[in-house]
Image: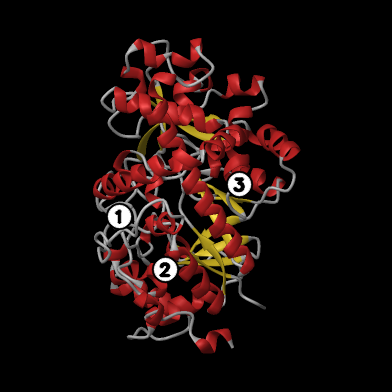
Amino acid sequence: MKKHLGILLAVSSLPGNHGIGDFGDSCYKLIDWLADNGYEYWQTLPLNPVGPGYSPYMSTSSNALEYRYISLDMVSKMGLIPKVAPHNPDTTHVDYYDVGEFKRRELYLAYRKFIKNHKETLHKFKTQNPWVNTYATFEVFKSLNDNKQWNEWDERFLNYFNHHNKPPRTFKTEINFVIFLQYLALKQWKRVLRYAKKKNIKIICDMPFYVGFDGVECWLHRDQFQIGPDNKLFEVGGVGPDAFSDVGQLWGSPIYNFERMKKDNYKLLIDRVGYLASLCDYLRIDHFRAFDTYYVIPAGEETARNGEWKIGPRDEFFNELYKRYPNINLIAEDLGDLRPEVLELRDQFNLPGMFICEFTIFDLKQESTERQLVYPGTHDNETLYGWYLNLNDDQRWFIANRLNTTYDDGLYDKIVEYIYKIPSLMTIFQLQDVLKLDNSGRMNWPGTVGDPNWTWKLKDFSFTKEVKYPKKEWVE
């Protein structure tokens, strides 16, 4: 049976001339490498603007793209700026603040030149993407309010769109600059998508279930979330104690007001899913179980212990979604301690789920199917080699017996071969796993905020000579 293989790698983790991976040459080199080595899928993390702790899962907008992913080299090729000298090109961790300041300076120079000759182009972009006007206004207002959360803004900014239907002309230049950044980012990403299609590589993007509180959705649509009349959250999202943490995960994310959403057929959420799906071939819905049951924690709690599960919109939401987007391709992140109804909801709409080998290899009852995506681990787990190094002798003996092999220096190779051969719809390896990197290459530690989360980055493309798996004999 042919194996359908993919690589999980954040755009930010690509090599880059300016301190971060971007939508430039590195994307094309990765796609070429995938196509030349038998891979069919590239799974990215969310492409939206990063939020607190530089997490892409707590963004300020579901529509906008992270401006740091704009390739300055590509902007230079457009003739908008001279070629930009490398800036921390060899770093192995992203300094988001430094990258943001550096790129904004260069991109503002590009904007000044662009706006002189291409006002109509920007106007057309605004017309085709109406969300960009409110997003840009939000970003400018946030800056004018010392980057405070929107619920701490001055009144004239806080409720601006209650009284106006257009962005304020007073800040036209600042707002148009933010829109220009989105124009460039979307233009560059769509070019990457076209190239991937040409090379028969399919792109999988992630959609966080929740949005960030300090974002444009909550600012504009307060009635769609559990936000009190004082513009504060009275309950927040997360998950209870589980395999990741014995105190649970306190995300602090706003909870949807599903009763209110139901009145307009979940339009806000369906719009969000549909737009993100238009930016990729498959959209992986993070925390899928929340459509069945979502965890609610009273605001002010210090851990997620004192929460409760509530019933979500279930099939009612998906019936509406498929009415509007009958050909949408979704993947359900169906991990965690689930009640049977979650899997029933997944199967009702024929959504592929996920099988994480780091969780399942010690459970002889766990078997994958050809309707699942198989992963050694995701960005929230240890790298596979880091996980292996942390196993004790009894665990390694157990695995060796299960795989009918010996406990010796070749056991790690046997584990990777076992994962490679498991039945699956797709088998997705983190790039760190096929490079046999330890936990120095780990992307995220759930339940923690800040560095080194989300910062790991490849120094250059020498990794293409260092990839150890899959071995030729497995493929043959």
Where disc 1 sits, the SS reads loop
The residue depicted at 52 percent of the width and 19 percent of the height is 166
Look at label 1 and name its amino acid: Thr
Which circle marks residue 431 in the picture? 2
Residue annotated with mark 3: 277
The residue at the point 52 percent across, 47 percent down is 186
Q: Amino acid at mark 3?
A: Ala
Quadrant including the C terminus: bottom right
Mark 1 and mark 3 in contact? Answer it, CB < 8 Å: no
Q: Position of residue 397 (x, y in %)?
A: 36, 77
Where's residue 21, x and y in %?
37, 59
- The mark that comes first in sequence, 2 or 1, is 2
Question: Which label is found at residue 32?
Answer: none
Disc 2 and disc 1 in contact, CB within 8 angstroms: no
Q: Position of residue 190 (x, y in %)?
A: 56, 53
Answer above or below: position of 183 versus 4.
above
According to the picture, the residue beneath numbered tag 1 turns out to be 455
